Image (tube, rainbow, N blue to C red):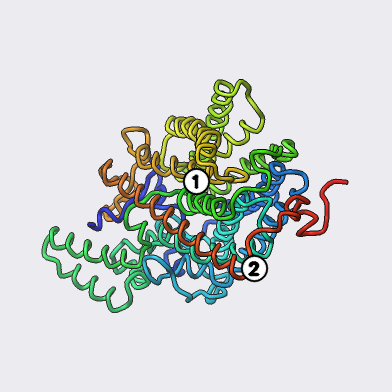
Amino acid sequence: MTFRAFTRRRLLPGALGLALAGLLPAGSAFAAATVNKGDTTWMLIATILVILMTIPGLALFYGGLVRAKNVLSVLTQVFICFSLIGILWVLYGYSIAFTGGTAFFGGLSKFFLAGVDVSTLAATFSKEVYVPELTYVMFQLTFAAITPALIVGAFAERMKFKAVLLFLVLWFTFAYLPMAHMVWFWAGPDAYTLSADNLDAVKAAVGEQAATDFLAKLAAAADDAAKATVLADYGNAVNASNGWLFNWGALDFAGGTVVHINAGVAGLVCALVLGKRVGYGKDAMAPHSLTLTLIGASLLWVGWYGFNAGSNLEANGLTALVVLNTTIATGAAALAWTFGEWVTRGHPSLLGAASGAVAGLVAITPACGWVGPAAAILIGLIAGLVCLWAVVWMKARFGYDDSLDVFGVHGVGGIIGALLTGIFVNPALGGSGVTDYLAPDTSTKLLDYAFGTQMTAQIVAVLTAVVVSGVVSYLALLICKAVTGLRVSEAEEREGLDIASHGERAYN
């Protein structure tokens, strides 16, 4: 693959726009770096919004969907997952996801945030613009924490708490972190400017000796063709440290593959390995409180603005576009699911509207900064109908018990969003296109859109997420089965996990 194929990034007309993939690795504090207080403030607000969508948002959404005897168990699992993964993120997660190592897995150079303090900076998506690295660390922590928490919905009401904790640790370490590294880790925008004025960034990207050699070759180049050769060689050297799927050109603005497909596939594997709940298909298992579910879904929707718009890492017009796309895609999906249910099942339901909204949020996540508003609405409509089909027909057809439809909404919705991103990023369809980092002015130079190339990258990313999460989830469950056992006893399951596992009741 050529360097031009590697250096893709999307562009908001009239602004520097946003780099390929959702998030950037931390970088050194370069002499020309500018820390924008507005960007930093926005990122801290976005971080808090993502915490809101996890606790209490996801916890209440899931809590309302289970039976009354299991509501506290689900709330506890989500709450403790957030707490546990937050500690692991600081301990080794951030380093593995966002430092150099291999194309598939980072290193431990920032173990326990070594070298990270209030003075170190992290790159944004504009050249010479940075935010404090601790801001970036915390923002990424929230992504890492909510993703395994999503899986809880698939094995709700039947898994041992000890097994839940061990599974979350294993899955986070060997599924989430590699996917985050492969999709989102790259050298940063400043690394692609080969210039003596940009010496610190060049050294950080390729090393001091290689930087000296490339600058000497560029100075000695006799004509434009020779300079282009040097730049291409330099670009390939920079890309050597990038994540594998990043170098494929896979587009994932805020986590379609890393978060939703990753968690959705894990949920499916858990449902298949654990088997059905006692009484599934015979006993009533309706949600015990749709009021809690709607409150949770509403908090998810609000918090998702931090999730999606925060992934821009800057406060600008592109951030506003992401907020708009997230809003209208979600609304379209809620409407599509509601009317689809009305036509096929004879009634519109609150549960359907809330489920459709979450499906729309999931599907727009990888696309929200790459597509125009018309495409966002279409993505929402498609996601609402297809996820309804997956939850109502596909699950019944194959007979698995995904308790809260993690795969049907997050897995299927994530796949839809990832694939449609590859189509609607096309500027001819209102998309933002991708920027050529080698161009003298990256605010105006776009690469030619190639449908086959882009869709290949999207498909490879989807398949990678499916394989990585599927294999890691299965092996992690086997380890949990051997160490702690997987399921509670039938008697405990019938009694409810609130009493059996936690010794308390939600309601008197």
Cα distance between the residues tagged 2 and 1: 27 Å
Task: Look at 39% across and 49% down and name the residue there.
Answer: 251
Task: Look at 54% across and 42% down and name the residue there.
Answer: 399
Whether 244 is drawn above or below 354: the answer is below
Near-viewer residue (168 or 244): 168
Q: Is residue 195 visible?
A: yes
Single out the residue that lies furthest toward the bottom. 209
Relative side of 240 to 262, left or right: left
- Amino acid, disc 1: Gly
Q: Which residue is mark 2?
A: 484
Along the polypeptide, which appears first: circle 2 or circle 1?
Answer: 1
Q: Position of residue 449 (x, y in %)?
A: 28, 42
Relative side of 476 to 439, left or right: right
Relative side of 68 to 166, left or right: right
Task: Look at 23% across and 75% down and name the residue there.
Answer: 213
- Amino acid, disc 2: Thr
Q: Residues within 10 Å of mark 2 (few under 14, many from 20)?
A: some
Q: Residues within 10 Å of mark 1 (few under 14, many from 20)?
A: many
Task: Look at 22% across and 57% down and name the residue there.
Answer: 2
Single out the residue that lies furthest toward the left. 222
The quarter of the image holding the N terminus is: bottom left
Query: In the picture, residue 288 is in which quadrant?
Result: top right
Q: Marks 2 and 1: CB-CB under 8 Å?
A: no
| Residue 462, label in figure | none
Q: Which residue is mark 1?
A: 411
Near-viewer residue (85 or 199): 85
Q: Is residue 46 visible?
A: no
Query: In the picture, residue 105 is in which quadrant?
Result: bottom left
Relative side of 126 to 52, left or right: left
Tell me the mark number nearer the camera, choosing from 2 and 1: 2
Per the image, label 1 sits on a secondary structure element best described as helix
